[in-house]
Image: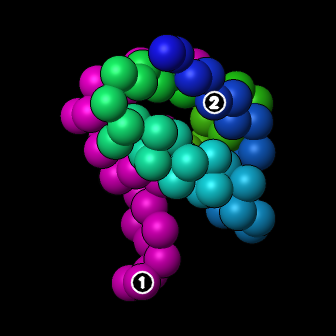
């Protein structure tokens, strides 16, 4: 089964993209699941390389890398 996640909110300031990525990671761990993440608009900031975030805060770049390592497709 394929699940598509569409992110269109900025990575920081609210938690919509973060929660979408968390949900995508949970689905990607399930057997026989294919995850696709489509990034558009303000969510493009989620994929910025070399993000500097304070200790203890989520880093959407790292989350996306983890998804890709699990076989997810990420498109912008």
Observer able to see residue 64: no
Magenta stretch: includes residue 27: no
Is 54 on the left or on the right of 10, as rendered? left
Direction bottom: furthest residue: 55
Closer to the camera, 5 or 8? 5
Residue at 45% across, 48% down: 26
Color theme of the render = rainbow
Is 64 on the left or on the right of 46, as rendered? left
Residue at 73% across, 54% down: 16
Answer few, some or many: residues within 10 Å of disc 2's Cα (few below 14, many 20 plus, some between 14 and 19): some
Is 12 on the left or on the right of 30, as rendered? right
The segment highlighted magenta reads: 47-76
Of badges 2 and 1, the one in the foreground is 2
Observer able to see residue 63: yes
- Residue 17 position, x and y percent, is 66, 49
Mark on residue 2? none
Q: Relative to 59, does residue 44 appear above or below in the rendering?
A: above
Answer few, some or many: residues within 10 Å of disc 1's Cα (few below 14, many 20 plus, some between 14 and 19): few
Residue at 42% across, 83% down: 56
Residue at 35% across, 52% down: 62
- Residue 3 position, x and y percent, is 57, 23
Element marked by disc 2: strand
Q: CA distance from mark 2 to mark 1?
A: 25 Å
Please identify the quadrant where the C terminus is shown: top right
- Residue 36 position, x and y percent, is 51, 21
Mark on residue 5? 2
Between discs 2 and 1, the one toward the N terminus: 2
Q: Relative to 16, does residue 69 appear above or below in the rendering?
A: above
Element marked by disc 1: loop
Magenta stretch: includes residue 57: yes
Is 55 on the left or on the right of 71, as rendered? right
Query: Residue at label 1?
Result: 56
């Amino acid at each position: 089964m394929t699940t598509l996640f569409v992110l269109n909110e900025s990575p920081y300031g609210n938690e919509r993209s973060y929660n979408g990525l968390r949900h995508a990671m949970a689905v990607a761990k399930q057997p026989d699941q294919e995850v696709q993440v489509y990034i558009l608009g303000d969510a493009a900031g989620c994929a910025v390389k070399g993000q500097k975030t304070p200790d203890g805060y989520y880093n959407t770049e790292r989350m996306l890398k983890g998804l890709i390592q699990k076989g997810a497709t990420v498109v912008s």
